[in-house]
Amino acid sequence: MDLEGINKKVLEKLEIAGFTIENLSILTSEELSSKIDLDIGEAKKIINKAQHKLGIQPISAMKFLELESKRGKITTSSNEFDGILGGGVWTQELTELAGGFGSGKTQLCFQLCINVQLPFEEGGLEGNAFFIDTERTFSPRRVVEMASYRELDVEEILNNIYISSAVNTHHLFSIVDQLDEIIPEKNIKLLIIDSLASHFRSEFIGKGKLVERQQKLMKIAELLIMIAVKYDIAIVVTNQIIANVEEFLFGSPEEPALGFAWAHRPQQRIFLRKSRGSSRIARLFDSSRMPEREALFYVTESGITDAPYSTELFE
């Protein structure tokens, strides 16, 4: 545990008692003082430090603006796409990519895994990526192809992408629980789950399972958002789409899966759909920071681009 300004022996005592920065941040000074041999003043100081560490202390809107301006962004490799996101995929946020087969979700995830490693001045975060694969979609060969077109060190790019295959929701939660160790150790700046919907939709079927599914979705959403803020990383999850016979979304009888409860959790929600040839359309349809709008981008041999360097279509 790392809380600046707190005595080392006190920190050791807290760790032995099983406290984490997360559960310290939600205690009152009286509760902490009663659980461990500390006076109220010291307990309050520890709780304030923990809240500051997680970025959940009350601050002015001006201070919030200052902190927001310092947050990192990962380029998508498309200026048009970056534009609708306010400069790229932001750290300290949960970004959802929803779309059907061949809409470019996984291809964009591969591109972000490469781009996060770039220098800051080139739209990267000089960090590594952690890819949680629930559908066995990760393709190192495709990453090699995309990195080669940009004349990057392919071996280095691959060595800086860590992959874990989640076989069910229980395993997914287990992987997420390990991130507190993995993220600082591996210098992770981007976490991807492709796709979040896969196991939840296959394991929790029918109305009788709906409440349990929503509860688990809310739990993992809160964990992911806390991780994004705590470690100042970007988190991207892909989502499947379902038919909506009652109303049309963006001119299509489809909507993102996982329901209304999940819909309120991501800070940025993007709907991807096919257009002609290798072109795709990204629509930012839910954001607290940016207006609803669209961008045209292309999925080509070289990766995500603004211009169609190749007519080959990637599914």
Image (tube, rainbow, N blue to C red):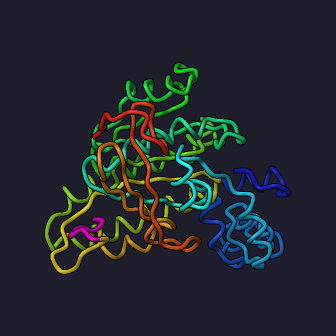
**In the visual, does 98 lie left or right of 61?**
left
Identify the image quadrant of the C terminus: top left
Is residue 19 visible from the viewing direction of this image? no
Residue 160 shown left or right of residue 13 in the figure: left
Q: Count the marks: how many?
A: 0
Question: Residue 193's spot in the image, x, y percent?
Answer: 40, 49
- The residue under the point 34% across, 46% down is 171
Snapshot quadrant of residue 241: bottom left
Horizontal side of 206 relative to 290 (left or right) equals left
At x 47%, y 53%, the residue is 236
Q: Is residue 256 magenta?
A: yes
Q: Nearer the viewer, residue 178 or 288?
A: 288
Q: Position of residue 93 (x, y in %)?
A: 56, 61
Give the x, y percent position of residue 84.
54, 62
In depth, the one of 77 and 175 nearer the eye is 77
Which residue is drawn at the image coordinates 44% and 36% (left, top)?
A: 303
Q: Is residue 24 above or below residue 9?
A: below
Magenta-tinted stretch:
251-257
